[in-house]
């Protein structure tokens, strides 16, 4: 069985490690903005931003991205996914964006997210941060910041479980894909 | 929630929670039209055909922009300038269009029932853009969205719909939708412009406008449909304007936070004066903006939910 953290303490530790890596890598915070992919990526982004703000003592802009309209499998689906809102309260032009998702698997969500972001403007660069990097890539996409690399069989899915106030991550759940 | 319909023919067919699903999703689609790049790839590869057997500016443009902003391909045909005017029956025309494999047909027709018939017989999605005196569902949805956007709610609002109720599919669709969402509706018109059987509608009716104004949250003026008034329903436009036109004096009688709506096109000087149409209370242009967003939502839902499984 793969080594997945389940206690809030372990998850907190992963988020703290990610924050440390970012602190070491990024020198100028003025142009850095975070964009989380709904809904798991947004949850991770909110937690990391909270930790970073406490460390550097200033506000870091955070936006939410809904990629439903950018998915490449819409024409194969029996029902289209629910469209939630993209809410990015700042211009992405010339920014260094840290794009956040919970799990990097096939790379298709990230492809959709990047397409969505470039429709909003022209960022200076986009970094990718994920809590879990799992094998099974179908697109040539890799993450810049990774919480943990794991190896899971294709039929398994990994999901974050949020606390009731939807502020923190309380568990990581692995389940089977429904066929 | 998955969307169970391939077509949208009438507000009467929808349940309250389905109307709310449409309204809730629409803000996300509205945001797209405010971007520099007003296009998302959601309906790439889909074809939307617009068949308009009656003149239309707003509705047709709005549907066309909505489809294009979702990356669908669109073609618009109007009755004049096509072989529709050569005597081909509507169902022959529909089968011929269907043979070219569209994914959605948006139809406006001068008589009630044709969109429903097409929806039953054709495998593609059919969206009613107005059929006779029956319904104009997308107009009512954009009106309800505009009210909800302004007031934050629909339930408990009092909506006055003023004018030619008899010939208005906009009024009918709004009555059905607003009642389902818990708004009160008052229809205001001279007796000659109230349809027979109105007493069976679940609404208040008034033949006088002035007493209604101080209690309405929304005053929705309908266009005097000159093209449908073959018979004399009132003595003249000036008399109509005197009794039922919204002018500055009447705007001042409205509740302080009440708004003015109009589905367009306006006959300025008949049912509405410049003062009223251009006043700060008017949300008429918001309605137009919201029309594109509502139609994006409906195209997305209709084209996505075509196969019902489980």
Image (spheres, rainbow, N blue to C red):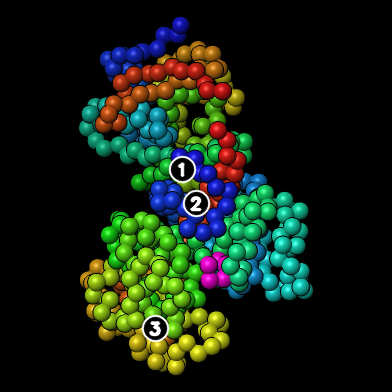
Residue B193: numbered disc: none
Q: Position of residue B187 (x, y in %)?
A: 37, 73
How far is the residue under mark 1 from the one under mark 3? 44 Å
User: On what subunit does the disc labeled 2 rest?
Assistant: B
Using residue B227 as the reference point, say whether residue B46 is left or right of it: right
User: Which callout, 3 or 2, points at the residue further toward the start of the chain?
Assistant: 3
Q: Which mark is residue B190?
A: 3
Give the foreground label among 3 and 2. 3
User: Which class describes the residues within 10 Å of circle 2: few (<14), some (14-19), or many (20+)?
Assistant: many
What is the number of the mark on residue B297?
A: 2
Chain ID, mark 3 = B
Residues behind callouts 3 and 2 on a single chain: yes
The alpha-carbon separation of the residues under discs 1 and 2 comes to 9 Å
Asked whether the beta carbons under mark 1 and mark 2 sit within 8 Å of each other, the answer is yes
Tell me if residue B141 comes above or below residue A150 in the rendering. Answer: below
Point out residue B22 in the picture as x, y percentages from the top left corner: 44, 51
- The one nearer the camera, B227 or A170, is B227
Looking at the rendered structure, whether the residues under marks 1 and 3 are on a common chain is answered as no
Quadrant showing the C terminus of chain A: top right
Look at 34% across and 38% down and name the residue there.
A62
Q: Residue A83 has which mark?
A: 1
- Residue for point 34% across, 14% down: A6
Query: Which range is magenta?
Result: B130-134
> Is A3 located above or below residue A132 in the figure?
above
Figure check: A112 above or below B188: above
């Amino acid at each position: 069985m793969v080594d997945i953290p389940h206690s809030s303490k372990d998850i907190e530790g992963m988020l703290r490690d990610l924050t440390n890596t970012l602190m070491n890598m990024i020198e100028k915070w003025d142009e850095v903005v975070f964009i989380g992919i709904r809904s798991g990526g947004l949850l991770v982004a909110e937690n990391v931003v909270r930790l970073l703000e406490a460390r550097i003592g200033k506000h870091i802009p955070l936006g939410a991205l809904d990629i439903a309209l950018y998915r490449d499998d819409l024409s194969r689906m029996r029902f289209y996914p629910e469209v939630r809102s993209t809410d990015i309260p700042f211009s992405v032009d010339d920014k260094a964006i840290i794009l956040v998702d919970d799990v990097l698997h096939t790379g298709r969500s990230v492809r959709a997210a990047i397409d969505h972001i470039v429709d909003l403007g022209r960022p200076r660069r986009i970094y990718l941060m994920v809590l879990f990097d799992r094998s099974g890539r179908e697109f040539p996409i890799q993450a810049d910041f990774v919480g943990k690399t794991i190896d899971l069989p294709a039929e398994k899915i990994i999901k974050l479980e949020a606390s009731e106030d939807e502020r923190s991550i309380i568990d990581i759940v692995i389940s089977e894909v429904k066929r | 929630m998955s969307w169970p319909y391939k077509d949208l023919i009438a507000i009467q067919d929808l349940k309250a929670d389905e109307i709310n699903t449409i309204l809730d999703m629409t803000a996300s689609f509205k945001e797209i039209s405010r971007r520099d790049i007003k296009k998302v790839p959601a309906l790439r590869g889909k074809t939307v055909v617009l068949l308009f057997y009656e003149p239309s500016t707003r509705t047709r443009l709005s549907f066309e922009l909505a489809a294009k902003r979702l990356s669908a391909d669109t073609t618009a045909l109007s009755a004049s300038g096509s072989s529709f005017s050569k005597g081909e029956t509507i169902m022959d025309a529909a089968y011929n269009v269907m043979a070219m494999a569209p994914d959605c047909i948006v139809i406006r027709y001068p008589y009630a029932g044709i969109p429903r018939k097409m929806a039953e017989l054709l495998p593609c999605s059919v969206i009613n853009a107005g059929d006779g005196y029956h319904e104009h569902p997308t107009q009512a949805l954009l009106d309800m969205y505009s009210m909800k956007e302004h007031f934050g709610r629909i339930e408990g609002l009092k909506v006055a719909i003023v004018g030619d109720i008899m010939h208005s599919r906009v009024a009918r669709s709004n009555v059905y939708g607003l009642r389902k969402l818990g708004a009160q509706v008052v229809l205001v018109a001279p007796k000659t412009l109230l349809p027979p059987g109105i007493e069976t509608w679940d609404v208040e009716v008034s033949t006088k406008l002035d007493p209604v104004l101080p209690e309405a949250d929304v005053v929705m003026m309908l266009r005097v449909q000159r093209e449908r008034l073959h018979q004399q329903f009132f003595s003249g436009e000036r008399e109509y304007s005197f009794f039922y036109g919204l002018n500055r004096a009447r705007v001042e009688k409205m509740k302080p936070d009440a708004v003015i709506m109009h589905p367009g096109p306006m006959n300025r000087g008949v049912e509405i004066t410049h003062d009223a149409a251009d006043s700060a209370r008017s949300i008429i242009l918001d309605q137009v903006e919201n029309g594109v967003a509502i139609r994006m939502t409906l195209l997305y839902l209709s084209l996505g939910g075509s196969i019902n499984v489980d």
